[in-house]
Image (tube, rainbow, N blue to C red):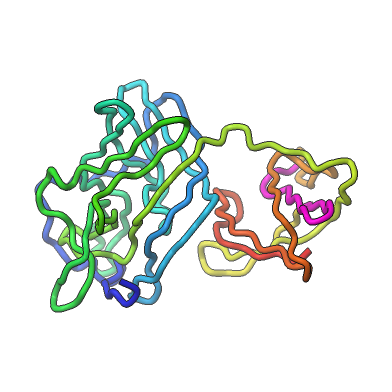
Amino acid sequence: MKKCYATLLLAALCSTATLAQQQDSLITQPAPGETINLYRTTTGYESVYYYAVDHQSTGDWQRMVFGEDGAVYLENPINSIYTQTWIKGYRTEGDTIAFQLPQAIFSEEDFFSGDTRYGYLERVRPGERNGKQTLVPNEDPADQVLKYVWHGDSLKMVLPEGELIGMCLASGSWTSYAEATYKGVRMDNNTMVPPASATVNDGLMLYMDMEGQSQLYPVRYALDGSDVYLGDLSAKGNDGRHDRHLPRHLLRRHRHPDGMLCLCLFCRGGQGQGRDGYRV
């Protein structure tokens, strides 16, 4: 699948065919309820210049909400595309949560017509479309039920062997975004404080924003042997300046002997989103 070709959503919005079961409505806000913070690890594909390339990620933040309306909401179901939308499902037997797909997770305005076009989350499998190997949606509605198991403060996606979840157009064309494996672990208390023996310093974080522009952001970091604590990722004081103490927004990683600290981050809101490497 590394060379699997698919048309990007931006390049294929001319399609007008719509499947009967698709819902042209995005969920941008879940119902009130209990919010669970998840630390997720995934593998799958992302779109790079019209091609699907391998995507792996660890440590991305995600939320799940057990709504007061009886539904269960899961945020950003495909890790490689930041949609800021939710899918809606329900508890079934035991620890299983089921989501009936397709569900709209992305929209944008067509450049030529001005119409709103949608990307849908679907269960997909390897197949052929227009003479090219790609991923194609399952046709039977029963094979479009996406299941997760919520047990012991962990959430795991359950799919038949060879299947993935992917974002497709109304026509069924895959957009090169997909997820093959998923596991989320509940992480509500992720605060930490560096030990008194650590040396605290000022630094700059280099990241790429959603427009592809490089940006610098002031942070605080602490060194304690081979451990590195990184703080001030988003918090500022009332005067707009960073507190001289490391705040609760803090990560701990091990430092490589050559002095390079590489982190894979997914920043929510604020200045930007991206994966970043920092030299300390």
Give percent across and percent down for residue 138: 15, 54
Quadrant the N terminus occupies: bottom left
Q: Quadrant of residue 118?
A: bottom left
With 157 as the anchor, is 185 left or right in this view?
Answer: right
With 58 as the anchor, is 151 left or right in this view?
Answer: left
**Above or below — where is 105 with respect to 127?**
above
Q: Nearer the viewer, residue 212 or 130?
A: 130
**Above or below — where is 211 with respect to 229?**
below
Residue at the (20%, 42%) spot, across then down: 145
Give percent across and percent down for residue 22: 17, 47
User: From which residue to which does the magenta span run?
Assistant: 220-236
* Magenta stretch encompasses residue 225: yes
Residue furthest front as drawn: 161
Residue at the (57%, 57%) spot, across then down: 272
Quadrant the C terminus occupies: bottom right
Q: Quadrant of residue 158?
A: top left
Number of labels in the image equals 0
Residue at the (46%, 38%) spot, across then down: 63
Q: Nearer the viewer, residue 140 or 243?
A: 140
With 50 as the anchor, is 173 left or right in this view?
Answer: left
Give percent across and percent down for residue 188: 57, 32
**Above or below — where is 111 with respect to 67?**
below
With 79 as the anchor, is 19 left or right in this view?
Answer: left
Give percent across and percent down for residue 205: 70, 61
Residue at the (67%, 47%) spot, across then down: 234
